[in-house]
Image (spheres, grey):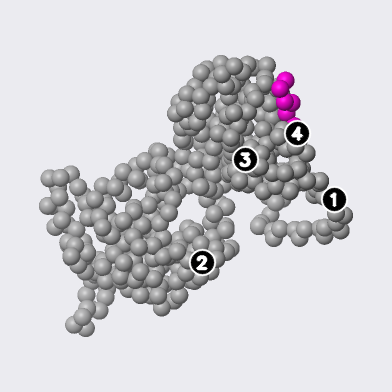
Amino acid sequence: MPTEILMPALSPTMEEGTLAKWLVKEGDEVSSGDLLAEIETDKATMEFEAVDEGVIGKILVAEGTEGVAVNSPIAILLAEGESAGDIGSSPAAAPAPESVAVVDASAEATAPATASEAPATPAPAAADGSRIFASPLARRIAANKGLDLSQLKGSGPRGRIVKADVVNASAAPAPAPVAKAPKAAAASAAPTGPSTDAVLKTYADRDFKEISLDGMRKTVAARLTEAKQTIPHFYLRRDIKLDALLKFRSTLNKQLEVRGVKLSVNDFIIKACALALQTVPEANRVWAGDRMLQLKPSDVAVAVAVDGGLFTPVLKDAEMKSLSALSTEMKDLATRARDKKLGPHEYVGGTFAISNLGMFGIDNFDAVINPPHGAILAVGAGSKKPVVGDDGELTVATIMSVTLSVDHRVIDGALGAQLLQAIVENLENPLGMLA
């Protein structure tokens, strides 16, 4: 039977994507590992590879199509001995449901291939009308054995019922549907602002341009709205004296010049935060719904602005890396982030994030926590300010203001203060970071 090629989930946050470009056409033979298409996710444009071999029988989604749901059919793959005439009897030719589970190709590899041997069984539904997700082969076997699929538990991806689930099941009469009281009308969602129509009406007499939301902007909006609504933020603020760090940085950069390495203040901040998470390990945590996870390594994410949104590439095991190694890795990640060439493994994870707007002259700000992180450090610009020295005399120092946004579910006030104190000590005594 023809096999559905499904829209892949190429990042953990991807719910839909844009089929940017097909790299094959109908009639092309493909093997496992061949490139099929370019998919625009919520974060990047990535290449999609074939899992099975066969012939592209039909392309269901045209290139350039936006909003293609993950796991919905985008093409049909024909196996050896199958022809385009078999497509009409394939479930893949039917309109795609809103959410379709991944095909269990291995379980169906031994199935009869032609529609004449066993006609496709319509997708079953539970007594309450909800769709039951089952492979075409599982549906046919269930129909032949008189099985009620609503009584079976699927072992396939996302609970999909596959061949193995029905082969070993014994037939049992389907239970009579139980009459249910009509459900009360669901409470309307809390308003998130004026409706689109209301806003358009407000500005109907003004000259404006509509800007559609791409996948990245939709994801940023959804995740940050979720963060501010569900994470109990609190904020800790400190001023940091940078003079010793700036002098030390200048010395190091002169020595590293022959290697083509130039350390930034941000490199020192990354290192300081990574070491602080080791000093205060109870703060190296993420929120995991009904529990917390405390990581042993310091995996530090750094916000990078890109056109239309931002990435937070993660520097893993940052406490173990030298300043020059962190600098080189961060420059590479930032460059590829702006080109949208990062893989999901490079921007997913971490327990702690850094957002630095000092280069734009921002003195201080409050950053929004990126779930499931426990905290994020907002970094402002360093500037000359009058301060009272240790000897009581008025002097001038370079001061940088930082704000630590903390998830109170993960880190309490005193623990957050200890973490911020450790960061401050590392930055004000930079030589100690090399010990």
The disc at residue 164 is: 3
Q: Which residue type does callout 3 highlight?
A: Ala
Q: Amino acid at mark 1?
A: Pro
Examine the image and state in which quarter residue 142 appears: top right
Q: Nearer the viewer, mark 4 or mark 1?
A: 4
Magenta segment, prevailing SS (helix, strand or loop): loop
Mark 4 → mark 2, Cα distance in angstroms: 45 Å
Tag 1 residue: 177
Label 1: how many Cα within 10 Å (few below 14, some 14–19, many 20+): few
Label 2 or label 3, whichever comes before in sequence order: 3
Measure the alpha-carbon separation of dots 3 and 4. 15 Å
Q: For the residue marked with disc 2, what is the amino acid?
A: Arg
Does dot 3 land on a helix, a strand or a loop?
Answer: helix
Which callout, 2 or 3, points to the residue nearer the camera? Answer: 3
Circles 2 and 3, Cβ within 8 Å, touching? The answer is no
Nearer to the camera, 338 or 247: 338
Left or right of residue 114: residue 102: left
Q: Which mark is in front, 4 or 2?
A: 4
Q: Residues within 10 Å of mark 3 (few under 14, many from 20)?
A: some
| Residue depicted at 75% across the width and 37% down the height | 145
Q: Secondary structure at mark 4?
A: helix
Give the CA separation, mark 2 to mark 3: 34 Å
Residue 152 vertical placement versus 426 (above, below): above
Give the residue pinned by disc 4: 144
In the structure shown, which secondary structural element does the residue marked by tag 2 occupy? loop
Q: Find out whether the residues at labels 4 and 1 contact each other: C-beta distance under 8 Å.
A: no
